[in-house]
Amino acid sequence: MDFIVFTPIPSFFGFVAFLALLALDIRRRRLALASILRLPVLAIFDLLPPALTAGVVAALIATCYPEASDRGVLPLRSPSTLGVVLCLAFFPVVWTEGRKQIQFQRPFGLLFAEWLVFAGAARILLLVVFHHPGDAQISRSVLFALPSILAGGALIAAVVPQFIKKYEGLRILERVARDEQTTQPEYTAATAECPQPGLWRMLDSQTTEVEVLDFLKTLVTTVKPKLVVETGTFLGHGTVKLAEGLKENGFGKVITIEFDPAIRARAEERFKACGLAPWIESRLESSLETNIEGMIDLLYSDSHLANREAEIRRLLPQLDPRGLLVIHDASSHFKIVRETALRLEEEGLISAVLLSTPRGVVVAQRREGRH
Ligand SMILES: C[S@@+](CC[C@H](N)C(=O)[O-])C[C@H]1O[C@@H](n2cnc3c(N)ncnc32)[C@H](O)[C@@H]1O
């Protein structure tokens, strides 16, 4: 078999391409060199697949080049050419997976595991296409390909199930403990009502979009609420914006409700650090059991999707008729919340405006407030 062996010149090109892609990937992940060393080993391995794939492509092209330039044509029936085609077809997959890993807190090691499976499968495909009966390369190829596929499969089996079991918010919490949060393009896919979600920014997939956070503060400075209630504190970014508005107004309080102790503890650290704790009452309880004294002027509903209808129905009677109900995650991605808002409107309880943001926001008021 005409097997691929990298001589020094293709190896050099491969190495340069590997380093270039590695640097590019590190840059798009906004990783400082010092923080890379603090990453778990599997997360460091996840930086390798795009760089390795680019390195192999460059080395293969450099391998084909002398023959192609001598003959004046690309050798179509050669392992190098097929290798380039396979790597180029696989590259967008690893590159996109890398982006998803940043946005969705995918399990560490998954990308590297997928690459191991790809590398093994590609080697077997080359063998099937190019081997000649009795070829001595067969056993060497199989010796490389099988362990690669098995190692990739074993890694996937080890990391994926325990990842799926954990609530996404807790995964973000773990990551935030290690890395600073930075803004990145919004993660949700386009919807009919919001065809360009990439125009918005987010810190993570659980925290309210950056622009909507600013909108929350503006709502507070615009309608001057005395009592604001937020269901679902998470890392406290929404609470902080609401509290910033209250501080600017010079009066009021935000009660924020979170039922996960670890998440709530992290949010409390943020409240103390930003000096807004006096404007915030942070409760460790469920929105479905909380008791609020007095009337609410602004209710921001942002807990788990499945809890929304029950929590809104529970708190709506306490919403001042001149007050505002803001429901997050009401886009057509999150039908359960959108349908709740539309149902409450059909029942004559609220009048709603659906803002076309990536995750969707409903701004509503009680019907009896419309005089
Ligand atoms: C989408 S995040 C909230 C994001 C936050 N409001 C912000 O603006 O960044 C949802 C949070 O609600 C919490 N949660 C979910 N259901 C809840 C409930 N019924 N009561 C209290 N907290 C809840 C989850 O633990 C999670 O931290």
Image: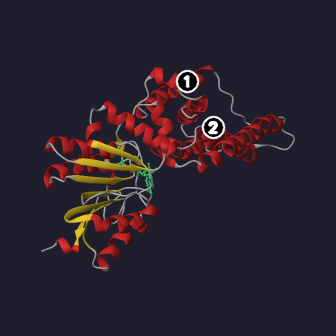
Amino acid on which disc 2 is placed: Ser
Q: Residue furthest left?
A: 371
Asked which secondary structure carries label 1, the reply is helix
Q: Which residue is mark 1?
A: 15
Q: Position of residue 64 (x, y in %)?
A: 59, 33
Amino acid on which disc 1 is placed: Phe
Quadrant in which residue 85 is drawn: top right
Mark 1, other Cα within 10 Å: few <14 / some 14–19 / many ≥20: some
Q: Look at the image and tell me whether residue 107 can be seen.
A: yes
Q: Is residue 349 left or right of residue 80?
A: left
Q: Is residue 328 left or right of residue 324?
A: right
Query: What's the distance in space between the residues labelled 1 and 2, CA to CA?
Result: 17 Å
Q: Is residue 17 above or below residue 293?
A: above
Q: Are marks 1 and 2 in contact (CB under 8 Å)?
A: no
On the rendered image, what quadrant is the C terminus found in? bottom left
Q: Look at the image and tell me whether residue 95 can be seen.
A: no
Quadrant in which residue 153 is drawn: top right
Asked which secondary structure carries label 2, the reply is helix
Q: Which residue is mark 2?
A: 80
Point out the tag, 1 or 2, that comes first from the N-terminus.
1
Q: Is residue 345 above or below residue 46?
A: below
- Tell me the residue at 31%/46% (across/down): 238
